[in-house]
Image (spheres, rainbow, N blue to C red):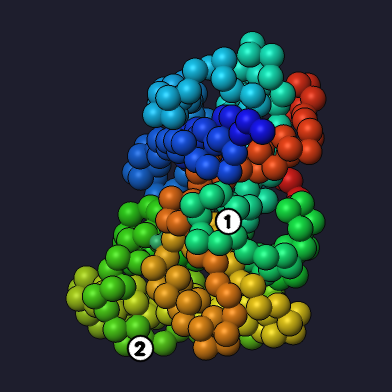
Amino acid sequence: MNKSIILGIESSCDDTSAAIIKGNSILSNIAASQKIHLEYGGVVPELASRAHQQNIIPVVHQALTKANIQQNEIQAIGFTRGPGLLGSLLVGTSFAKSLAMSLDVPLIEVNHLQAHILAHFIEDANPTPPKFPFLCLTVSGGHTLIVLVKDYFDMEIIGKTIDDAAGEAFDKIGKVFELDYPAGPIIDRLAKEGNENAFEFSKPKLQGYDYSFSGVKTSVLYFIQKEIKKNPNFITENINNLCASVQKNIIDILLNKLKKAAEDYKISEIAISGGVSANSQLRESLKKLCLQKKWNYYIPKFEYTTDNAAMIAMVAKLKFDKKEFTDIRTTATAKYNL
Ligand code: KG4
Ligand code: ZN
């Protein structure tokens, strides 16, 4: 049987990305991230939408060129329909619809969160894909979820954040530390040179599997304000230790609940996904926990963690096999449940 060739398009936030998948194997995965938001300390929706419009054609073109695929070889087009910023989603959605019409190929809508999770099934994401049922800690700038994945398209959220997402916590605390946006990768890098036990910050006392990160953020803010009064250079003099301590705090919170869920649900297949799963210490700590508990762990290849179109193409491929196509009159949606 010939392997299907599908174009995936992602534009839910501030990365414009296009990828070509053949079977389960990624031939290209191109992303243009938008630097314009740096000076504002966060994503400005209107600017993101405009940048997607500038980027989308060159990014799709590059994805085709790198994959050495002609337009007429594309058998379907997958696109992120939601959740995300509406103005950003509209760019990818409109482009995907127009191209699907002009090439006369099926259009396939993809849920961005499902895509973060199903990225594990891309051929080179893991040495072997997770086995159902598995638990997936999905941690990004907008979401923090513990998902029970029973099958490709049968997922149940068993835990979620009641306020900030984990990535948002990294980014907001990074702002307190006067770091650039997004601060997550910067904290990751600086933490490597720091002592994770240097400072202690608060931990939420929530029952069950839900998360909360706003208290952590506030405790860091108050601590910094107090220390700066005594020493105006406190942040710069302690930045590595601050990053290491905050990172440890967030990871402990994330993994404690994940561990509890795995024990209670008696599931020994454990995965992580989403932008925060790029965090090197989270990856290390998950590995350590799983080795200790004799659980199988699935940590996706780095390029499939933060927003990317490869994961969108992967979901589109799974739907293509089931002939689950989307009507051309579809519209983007900012909210989209799993
Ligand atoms: O999945 P993603 O690219 O976009 C959303 O769907 O939100 O996740 C972006 C988030 C940002 O908050 C960013 O700071 C965080 O992922 N992030 C990290 C790292 N790389 C990205 N957080 C901690 N450590 C990292 N290495
Ligand atoms: Zn994402």
Nearest the camera: 152 or 139? Answer: 152
Q: Is residue 193 visible?
A: yes
Nearest the camera: 168 or 225? Answer: 168
Residue 172 percent across, percent down from the top left:
45, 62
What's the mark number on residue 197?
2
What's the mark number on residue 7?
none
Nearest the camera: 263 or 167? Answer: 263
Q: Amino acid at mark 2?
A: Asn
**Displayed quadrant of residue 242:** bottom left
Image position of 132 (left or right of 231): right
Pointer 2: residues within 10 angstroms few (<14), some, or many (20+)? few
Residue 79 percent across, percent down from the top left:
63, 33
Q: Amino acid at mark 1?
A: His
Pointer 1: residues within 10 angstroms few (<14), some, or many (20+)? many
Q: Please, what secondary structure does the residue beneath circle 2 have?
A: loop
The CB of the residue at mark 2 lies under 8 Å from ligand 1: no
Q: Residue furthest front?
A: 1
Of circles 1 and 2, the one toward us is 1
Query: Vertical placement of 260 versus 79: above or below?
Result: below
Q: Quadrant of the N terminus?
A: top right
Residue 265 percent across, percent down from the top left:
76, 80
* Earlier-in-chain disc, 1 versus 2: 1
Point 62% across, 64% down: residue: 130
Query: Vertical placement of 324 versus 236: above or below?
Result: above
Image position of 110 (left or right of 13): right
**Displayed quadrant of residue 331:** top right
Point 76% across, 21% down: residue: 328
Query: How far is the residue under mark 1 from the one under mark 2?
Result: 33 Å
What's the mark number on residue 120?
1
